[in-house]
Image: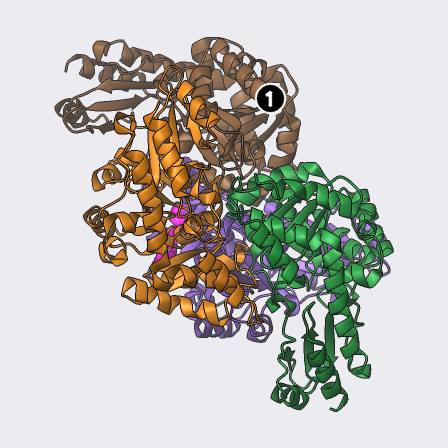
Chain colours: A purple, B brown, C green, D orange
Amino acid sequence: MKFFSDNAAPVHPRVWAAMQAADTPDKAYDGDALSRRLDDAFADAFGTPCTALWVATGTAGNCLALAAMAPPHGGVVCHREAHIEIDEGGAPGFFLHGAKLLLAAGEGAKLTPETIRAVIDPIRPEVHQVQPHAISITQASEYGRVYTPAEVAAIGALAQERGLGLHMDGARFANAVAHLGCHPADVTVRAGVAALTFGFVKNGGMGAEALVFFDPALADVVRFRRKRAGHLQSKGRYLAAQVLAMLEGDLWLENARAANAAAQEIAAVCGDRLIHAVEANEVFVVLSPAEQQALHAQGFEFYDWTAPPGAPGAARLVTAWSSPPLEVQALARAIAAL
Amino acid sequence: MKFFSDNAAPVHPRVWAAMQAADTPDKAYDGDALSRRLDDAFADAFGTPCTALWVATGTAGNCLALAAMAPPHGGVVCHREAHIEIDEGGAPGFFLHGAKLLLAAGEGAKLTPETIRAVIDPIRPEVHQVQPHAISITQASEYGRVYTPAEVAAIGALAQERGLGLHMDGARFANAVAHLGCHPADVTVRAGVAALTFGFVKNGGMGAEALVFFDPALADVVRFRRKRAGHLQSKGRYLAAQVLAMLEGDLWLENARAANAAAQEIAAVCGDRLIHAVEANEVFVVLSPAEQQALHAQGFEFYDWTAPPGAPGAARLVTAWSSPPLEVQALARAIAAL
Amino acid sequence: MKFFSDNAAPVHPRVWAAMQAADTPDKAYDGDALSRRLDDAFADAFGTPCTALWVATGTAGNCLALAAMAPPHGGVVCHREAHIEIDEGGAPGFFLHGAKLLLAAGEGAKLTPETIRAVIDPIRPEVHQVQPHAISITQASEYGRVYTPAEVAAIGALAQERGLGLHMDGARFANAVAHLGCHPADVTVRAGVAALTFGFVKNGGMGAEALVFFDPALADVVRFRRKRAGHLQSKGRYLAAQVLAMLEGDLWLENARAANAAAQEIAAVCGDRLIHAVEANEVFVVLSPAEQQALHAQGFEFYDWTAPPGAPGAARLVTAWSSPPLEVQALARAIAAL
Amino acid sequence: MKFFSDNAAPVHPRVWAAMQAADTPDKAYDGDALSRRLDDAFADAFGTPCTALWVATGTAGNCLALAAMAPPHGGVVCHREAHIEIDEGGAPGFFLHGAKLLLAAGEGAKLTPETIRAVIDPIRPEVHQVQPHAISITQASEYGRVYTPAEVAAIGALAQERGLGLHMDGARFANAVAHLGCHPADVTVRAGVAALTFGFVKNGGMGAEALVFFDPALADVVRFRRKRAGHLQSKGRYLAAQVLAMLEGDLWLENARAANAAAQEIAAVCGDRLIHAVEANEVFVVLSPAEQQALHAQGFEFYDWTAPPGAPGAARLVTAWSSPPLEVQALARAIAAL
């Protein structure tokens, strides 16, 4: 029973079907009919013209977008616990040619205009210090917390005021929108986001995310950078097929709702154990080492940690579109019984 | 009837089957059972211990390997018409942090010890000039020409003598080995190759190549670089599945033989039109603009060019594992009838 | 009366004399007789064989050294207030090709084994996280604090235990050694330092620092990187002359002692105003905005700040080898009279 | 008797005097009074507003300028024998983050619109190929050949037509202008040059070149990049002093005329030995190995080569502003006597 990561979930049957439907020769790279439908498909989803490029991973998507927003001598504000800072193996340093991540605080791994200002206001506007060029926020955050449209808009307003690009790492964008019940544009283009890494791999896809640009000039740069980074797959139609299948009939929302509901089912029994409000598909709970072991012994797999020593242990429980209801119920029961 | 590129061919049924067999949750990234089988599978194929990493594209594979062989201030000798020089959008400059490609000549886009020496011998061994650190050869070459084991070994000997790493871009490695009828080790590890980009995408795969290292120290570096380049896919098991299916029962050879045979069938009618000996699955022929048009009008798609002005036109006809025999015969007849 | 920075001080007469003595044609770059004397001169100063390269700035020196110690995908531990992190315009990101600075705490801007471990121990040894490859410490620190030989040795032992390179940013190395009264080797090569950026510009030089390597393999790489960074000046003999003049008769120590003594003279009147113990040539004092203004009005120039709002203001007073005694006395009197 | 390189010549007395006049404390970096005079001084020299930054070396100057003109995924057209391609240790790869030099031909190491077009016209305007963003020409060229105003203007027109930046490597700009007898603007800003690396080190300076921008947006970027590259020296006033002294009273022209005249004196006796027309301060002559030895035996130092084997040997004789007339006459006599 795997609650380790939504990363490891299987591929949705409709995604498989779409990939197989793409299994006839077509133009290579992104010249095929499916890849050429992406812009329109996302324009429909967001209600505004946009440019969309497939890319295999969120790391590549995030870093390609940011590389179009910040020059090598510039900086990007992100949360000090953001994925790009902590868990991408230094990819921003690579794709942005040494540009600097400027680390800001914020509850629940969410930035606010105040925490951003606390980082950028003290920067002297001269050559000895790296100047900010962009902001990157994560929706939902590393702790499964969701930015409301108003929260994104406040950051968007700051970004515009200071001339900074605004990027959203949407590895779990679907879960966030499912939670908010808003239009996807409400937390993106209408709130000042210029580029979105729209994640599908954790939500039923196989190996395709979408980079959605509401500013076409960014996309023009990223097309060259994508190839240069070895991310322009020659059989791109299979990636486009995945993305289109996820958009079709709002499968992305359907899957995210399932994952979110499973997380709520677990959260419901956690009470005071909850470390963060559960808004997407991640449940962070206090679990002593003994409790961790007890759950592991019952066959539940999840990421746990005990550091710092002396502190109570904790665990991260992640649900997916495909989490079997019986397993979710079993986990909830097991936690309740601790 | 598509003779544009093997890049655009469909995915082999056994590859599909293997991917679908992988559709149950497992560890993310390359921690899954399939990814962990790669080293052994390639050790079997090459008859020697090796380390193998999947990667989505040949560009990423080539550049990750070379980045482990040459420091940012170093150089890599390659043919002036090599893919890494001409058609990878500057990817080597990106992955190698500005290291330099040192361009050598050679008939059929193949390097020789002589043409390599002609480039590296005049380099003054001092800091004003970029020093060579590696050699990259392409098997089969950009013109579909194949290095024999002796030819690779001669370059390997030079590489060892000069302390240079030797990399093989094997986007069409299968076609080369099928042509040679040798053991795959004969043109790689036994001939001094330290790292091979073993291509599968053009030969029946979907989006997975293998980086095969005969020097494990290189692999240790590349593991970090692969993540840093956004190429560590979270559902890596689907890439491992493709690669294992291609190795299973030597499907890679079977597919390559089919593509090569189709190319021979076309070549057989080309006579004096042939620009390069046909050894793999590419046929380069002299075709006047009018002849190009005539073939296009009959439904044959291929890459053609007429430059430089005044020169006779030419075309590249590429076959794939899946080229329909009837279409191949039709093309052969059509050329014969010109 | 300038107490803004030792950066702006004039050039020592013996340095001028040495430069002018170099004003006859000799080999270009670092092939001249003076440049070739550097290794021996530093071997004498440190009592051990070493390799020394001139470079125009501390930023270049620090970053060239670190680039030889950490690969592009690696990390360098430094203090969160280190010059390389705060005030070098992102130079480490440039020279190290996107490698990451791993920021540690420590009183007085000094690292300790404990604060280093607090940063590196939680790093998971896998590809999603940037691994440490080197440590950089600053002697004297950004706050004019000095590492004792035992403190450096403790960090050196940790570095060795973990296989990390140890670099010392010695922009004010002379002031630190003058304060300690120890042999320069005691806080460098004998304590595990592999590369030292030995600063002369703040201490009587014009535009030459020395990169001193106790590990010759590092120097071999840096020679290429120095040229590649545009730092191999063609008339290098004028830089070598500066460095040799500073070493000759221990002028570096004589100058540093003068600057330190001036700082002590000021510190002596500061009492509770002192924010950091004064060990080198920098005096950090609490000064209200009104007091800052009062001193400025009397003609004293220095760097001051009032942030964060509500907090008492502060100022940095920097002395140099050339600080006129009368001006130093005047400043001390003026502070005492506040 | 040194005819090896103008790189090794001494510093002009007026440059020394200016440096010593700068030997009082002033603001650090480029905040001093002298550095702030540069823009106006060059505006006077070129008869048009411009922005000028000092930098220690031509390599840094060239690469900083080009980095502001071409993105990391772009390309810069230069001659295949240009200094940036051959002799800067891969610096363009470093400063431009892996952007590519696109190598063009041309007699005398000079580009022409035709040779540039021969390189850029075949580039397919798509992501697999590196697109040109700038052109770099060298005045005088690697072979001491000089572009006329009309020749530069023709390249400038092409650059404008194709939207490419135009950079001039003017390591020997002074020698070129002295030869042409034109206004310096005639071969730069009036001919479409956007950035000039104006060399002084080979012409009487010590360690200061000027980067002159006729497009201020480029300078804004370069200011940050200069610091990031460790090229913002803290005692910048000594560099500014050198540059201002060279401009004062057209010392740069006076020195260049002296060097050119010396070269002509040597050229006058070379007759058929001359490999390139002598237009600046370099004389390339056919000299057999025996003749090379004969001259060396008489105390003449110069760079010679004999490759390729069997070919007649050759030598490069470089004069400087300071070449002693008696030595020049002696060399001329010695060659005449061969």
Amino acid, disc 1:
Phe
Quadrant of the rendering where the C terminus of chain D is positioned: top left
Mark 1, chain letter? B
Residue under the point 53% across and 71% down: A148
Q: Which residue is mark 1?
A: B42
Q: Secondary structure at mark 1?
A: helix
Point out the stretch of residues depicted in magenta.
A216-224
Residue A326 x, y percent position in the rendering: 67, 49
Residue C6 x, y percent position in the rendering: 65, 68
- Residue D194 appears in the rendering: yes
Viewer-proximal residue, C232 or C25? C25
Q: Is residue A111 left or right of residue B253?
A: right
Viewer-proximal residue, A87 or C335? C335
Residue under the point 52% across and 47% down: C235
What main secondary structure does the magenta stretch of the protein show? helix
Q: Is residue C118 magenta?
A: no
Q: Is residue D314 left or right of residue B266?
A: right
- Residue B198 appears in the rendering: no
Residue B312 x, y percent position in the rendering: 17, 22
Q: Is residue C220 left or right of residue A314?
A: left
Residue C191 x, y percent position in the rendering: 82, 48
Q: Is residue A222 magenta?
A: yes
Which quadrant of the structure image shows residue B133? top right
Viewer-proximal residue, C94 or D41? D41
